[in-house]
Image (cartoon, grey):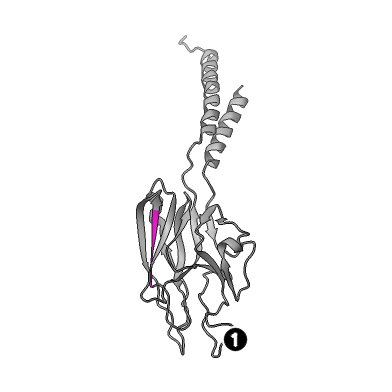
Amino acid sequence: MPHLFRLRIGLATAAIAMSGASLGGTASFDDLPNLPAVTAGASLFDANNSSLVYDGITWDSGFSIVGDQYRTGGQGATPPAPVFGVPHSGHYFATNENGGSVTLATNQVLTGAWFGRNEYYGFGGGADQVTIVAVSGGTDLAQVVFDLPANIPGSPYEQAAPLSFVDTSSFASLSGITGYRIDRRAPSQFSVNWVADDFQFSPASAVPVPGTLLLLGAALPGLAAVARRKKNHAPSSGRG
């Protein structure tokens, strides 16, 4: 019986530990199954085999995936046009395809990501600020505002600058997160995009699910029985 009881407790503990939605990690976009050429871009939906669920997160349809050799003025322009953006790692990064706000649906904690401006056809850099908002349903819980670094001046175009890290680890103190919204500030009509890479997530706190509670309920009688048995068989002590 003690062995059976320990097994029950072990199963219950494992069930609690595994009841979180996912294990966290980094979304780098380089492991998507249907990536475009490094000289092109595609919607995340298409790059992910017609699915918006990637790494356990539901990404907005406004996310696009772009290769690090995609040039905004065309591949054969003279002089060469600048690349659209610079990934933090690998050869691919994400951008807000339509220039507006995008969302992520997940209960994981977004602890940080790498963001920067894009370069758009020689008209200057993209959005100069992003605001990352943690939400619970339709309620904004907290936000982090980050000024994007300026691109590198060049002739005749600016050159897209390396990305900078946006620290959102403060979201770990929140409860009830259901997702995030990324807003942007556009200094001009052409400056509506940002580029981003390596979104870092940590798992949400594990919460017992109904099946886990049933398992614990089955284990508790065993705990009581073992405790009674030990008490009944405990040697009596006395003074001689």
- 161 or 117: nearer the eye? 117
Question: Badge 1 local density, few (<14 within 10 Å), some, or many (20+)?
Answer: few
Magenta range: 128-134
- Up-down: is 234 above or below 59? above
Residue 147, located in which quarter of the rendered image? bottom left
Q: In this view, does 188 lie to the left or right of 160?
A: left
Q: List x then y, in percent, for residue 127.
A: 40, 72
The stretch drawn in magenta includes residue 96: no
Q: Is residue 178 above or below residue 99?
A: above
Q: Position of residue 132 (x, y in %)?
A: 40, 60
Q: Residue at x 42, y 81 (%)?
A: 124
Q: Position of residue 86 (x, y in %)?
A: 51, 74
Q: Nearer the viewer, residue 165 or 157?
A: 157
- Taking depth in this image into account, of 100 and 1 the one nearest to the observer is 100
Residue extending furthest top? 240
In the picture, measured across the screen, residue 133 lies left or right of residue 108, that is: left
Q: Main SS type for the magenta part?
A: strand
Q: What element carries label 1?
A: loop
Residue designated by label 1: 76
Amino acid on which the number 1 mark rests in the picture: Gly
Question: Relative to 89, does residue 209 appear above or below in the rendering?
Answer: above
Q: Whole-percent x and y of residue 195?
A: 48, 70
Q: Quadrant of residue 29?
A: bottom right
Disc tally is 1
Query: In the rendered view, does 47 fall on the left or right side of 180?
Result: right
